[in-house]
Amino acid sequence: MRPNLLFPLIPVLLVITGCALPRPTSWKPEPFIWTGAQGKLAYEVKSPRGNLRGRAFFVAQPSFFYFEVLNPFGLAEAQGLVAGQEARLLVFSQRTLFRLTWEEGQDLACCWGAIILGYLPPSWLEGALVFSYREGYLLRRDLSSLYVKAFFDKEGNLLKLTVKGEKTYFDIQYTTANGVRLTEIKIPPLKTLLRLKFLRIRERAPVSLPTLEVPPGFRKKVFNLSLN
């Protein structure tokens, strides 16, 4: 097509592009004060090291997410805790403690339970930029060393949360079908996908941070997820 024939199409292209681009809006999600929950979930893990699936009991508050995998006799096969700047998994059958740590991302330390269950921390609304686009709303919040992008539908439901620095570290999607909540967590640097299907969720009063007691003789394997 000759260049002069493109000129009549330019206004049309600008209109189409303008409709697709996010634009500032006065809308903001309503702050939600969430205190905690407990219940049961089905999990699935896919990684280069192998795949796992099963069911677990969980306890969560805004600052942590704790879970236990039980055997048919009611004894713990594994215990996990995501809190602060690390995730810990104690596997009794392998007599091993796995630790995933990160030095940066202090702003995430207070919020792991909320993030996993799909609640945006109220403190992240302060100073956040919000844009409107065709499918809903986009919120961007700069943290001390990272930034987060949260996507909402037109009803204000959180659909996706991305934690980025120089690259994407956590990419989380939230869906609800037939009253069942599903959280999918991608960790691109580790090529790992974690699916959590919450079979039962019940609100509960705050509890103290659980501890993982590592039995004598257990091995420790430490992995670092650099966030800088």
Image: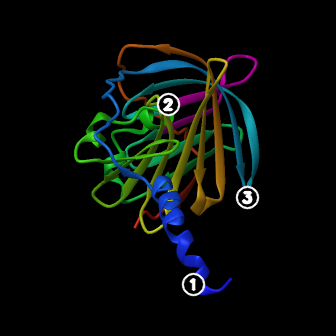
| Residue density around tag 2, few if under 14, some if 14–19, many if 20 or more, within 10 Å | many
Residue located 59% across and 85% down the image: 3
Residue 127 pos. (x, y %): 23, 47
- Select label 2 or label 1 by which is in front: 1
Q: Identify the residue under disc 2.
A: 117
Q: CA distance from mark 1 to mark 3?
A: 53 Å
| Distance from the alpha carbon under mark 2 to that under mark 1 | 55 Å
Frontmost of labels 1 and 3 is: 1
On-image quarter of the C terminus? bottom left
Residue at the spot of label 1:
4
Residue 67 lies in the magenta stretch: yes
Circle 1: residue type: Asn
Q: Which comes before the other along the chain, label 2 or label 1?
A: 1
Query: Which residues are drawn in magenta?
Result: 66-81
Q: Which numbered disc flags the more N-terminal residue, 2 or 3?
A: 3
Give the mark, 1 or 3, whose residue is nearer the N terminus: 1
**Disc 3 target residue:** 48
Q: Amino acid at mark 3?
A: Pro
Q: Main secondary structure of the magenta part?
A: strand
What residue appears at the point 74 percent right and 41 percent down from the top-left corner?
A: 52
* Amino acid type, label 2: Leu
